Amino acid sequence: MCGIVGYVGSRRVVPVILEGLRKLEYRGYDSAGIVYYQDSKLIKYRCEGKLSALEALIDDAIIAPSHIGLGHTRWATHGAPTTENAHPHTDCTGELVLVHNGIIENYHSLRLELQAKGHVFKSQTDTEVLVHLIEDYLENDLVAAVQQALTRVEGSYAFGLFWAQMPDTLIAVRKHSPLVLGVDESGAGYIASDIPALLPYTNQVIFLEDGEMAVIKENDMQVFDSVSGNRVQKEATTITWNAAMAEKAGYKHFMLKEIFEQPMAIRNTISGRINPETGEVTLAEINLSDEDFCNIDRIFLVACGTSWHTALVAKYWIEKYAKIPVDVDIASEFRYRNLLINDRVLTISISQSGETADTLAGIRLAKQLGSKVITICNVVGSTMTREADGTVYTHAGPEIGVASTKAFTSQLAAFFLFTIFLGEKRGTLETEKKLELAAALIDIARVIEELLPVLQEQIAQLIEGYYDCSDFLFVGRGVNFPIALEGALKLKEISYIHAEGYAAGELKHGPIALIDNKMPVLAIAPQDDLYQKTISNVEEIKARQGRIILIGTEGDKHLNTITDAIIYLPKVHDEMNPILYTIPAQLLSYEIATMRGCDVDQPRNLAKSVTVE
Ligand code: F6R
């Protein structure tokens, strides 16, 4: 998704903006641009491709003094990723400049109207109508012109703009797309699509809400309701992440670093929330009363992608231990189906970013229908956490690699905590069981930590025979079925190998037709209560000469009778298998993708935070 960075202050603006944009690269983009005010004029550079191409264009300017500017990385929606369509866009005078993230839904009619009035457009983007529309209302008062323009615009937007005739003022507006403000000790003001862009300069962040507009000068930042124009008082939040956390720290890729950070991420997620002596769970930001939890008779879990896989695992856990029926929905489906939701339903969104457009729309809808809403989220202060009644934070730290890894296992850890918490509130968990589950969760970070270095080496060797496959199947059963889905998603998104995940028992209802001696099938086969069933399914694959890779329990000799390609994992509590068995699936995808020469941190066509529908 598009990335916005803006700065007004006494530093040289170009390096600040380029560094900020670099920190947003993980969002995915296909062109980039920058504009700044220098020697009484606007200087603008735009190009297709990566930031390095933009940097090459503006080398000289990095040393030139300039104190206000905007930068943008564009993830194309309307119009191809060309230089002409790259942001910043300007009005007819060339003096008003704007960068935007989101979609202006009524751009077509606005464009026709503005063209009829003589405005000349230079791009195919929806964004360009915004800047011409503001120009149309602009006499002397830029803030008033923005306010008037906003009354005409439909859709989602976060944008930043400034005007050459007012070169001390940056304006930022947000509606349904993320935008944060930053302030530092020197009095400088920042705008950015996400917190990592600000971390090299400040950890003081102000979250803009939908419908708010910020007018930012050096030493002065004011926020208004963009409709009424009324002043809104905002407090800065101190972000505990630091800039180093968003660096690679010697790893070849963010994804690998984040895979190795999982023990820490899980520990941080559960730390201080679970009492090992009693199994009792405390969730400080949950904000719902015991009565609320006892009154619900159904739970809806809403998420996208990897976070949806977390929801699928959570369904097994919650139904088993808290004894409440759970529906799991992909957010883009949830928001458009006939929902039987009322005040006895609890809706839980799961999101790393807390900004995913479909998930956000889903919880807004659930709230309208009377449901209480909790979000399981990694980003403090993100939109979802502000809109939900309560939050269970995953404390995974910034996840930069586009493919979600540590956020996923931290979500699982957070959901397991929540399951114990709910079981406790609803009286469905015996103390003994609670202690058993708590102990299992507390121990899993240690197991993964000890395993990771050995596992990476083993998998690197194993994949040599598989990296050039064109298709891959992942299978699992029960609580591990979603891990098969997650393994397949990881592989396809970073290596571009076609991969599918199936419930192992479902193979014979269709997909088994694909099995031949070329088709690799990775089966998740821990010695749990479905072990024999899974092994029978694997035997069916073997009987059809499928190339089987097994992930199973250390010491399980039977696996050797099926295949030579085995990844052994330590025996842990059955309920921890989804967390444990995810790790080899992540490493396998990573190793295959790097062997194929893929850009694992920024896979083609993907964005980290999907803020458009
Ligand atoms: C896959 C991946 C995506 C995200 C999805 C939801 O590796 O990262 O499938 O899980 O886009 O994002 P969040 O969790 O930020 O709502």
Image (cartoon, helix red, strand yellow):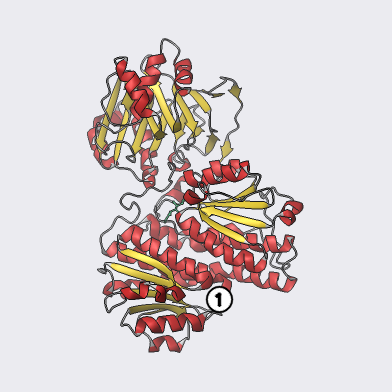
Ligand 1 closer than 8 Å to label 1 CB: no
Question: For the residue marked with disc 1, what is the amino acid?
Answer: Val
**Relative height, residue 536 to residue 606 (above, below):** below
Residue sticking out furthest to the top = 140
Residue occupying image coordinates x 41% and y 32%: 105
Number of numbered discs: 1
Counting from the top left corner in percent of width and height, residue 240 is at: 55, 45
Give the residue pinned by disc 1.
572
In this image, 398 relative to 230: left or right? Answer: left
Residue occupying image coordinates x 41% and y 67%: 501
Counting from the top left corner in percent of width and height, residue 536 is at: 45, 84
In the picture, which quadrant includes the C terminus?
top left
Question: Does residue 12 appear in this view?
Answer: no
Question: Does residue 548 appear in this view?
Answer: yes
In this image, 317 relative to 329: left or right? Answer: right
**Relative height, residue 286 to residue 202 (above, below):** below
Of residues 58 and 326, the one nearer the viewer is 326
In this image, 335 relative to 65: left or right? Answer: right
Of residues 356 and 385, the one nearer the viewer is 356
Counting from the top left corner in percent of width and height, residue 125 is at: 31, 32
In the picture, which quadrant includes the N terminus?
top left
Looking at the rendered structure, the secondary structure element under dot 1 is: loop
Residue occupying image coordinates x 40% and y 35%: 101
**Relative height, residue 349 to residue 5 (above, below):** below
Counting from the top left corner in percent of width and height, residue 49 is at: 26, 42
Of residues 439 and 124, the one nearer the viewer is 124
**Relative height, residue 120 to residue 413 (above, below):** above
Residue occupying image coordinates x 30% and y 60%: 496
Q: Residues within 10 Å of mark 1 (few under 14, many from 20)?
A: some
Q: Quadrant of residue 133?
A: top left
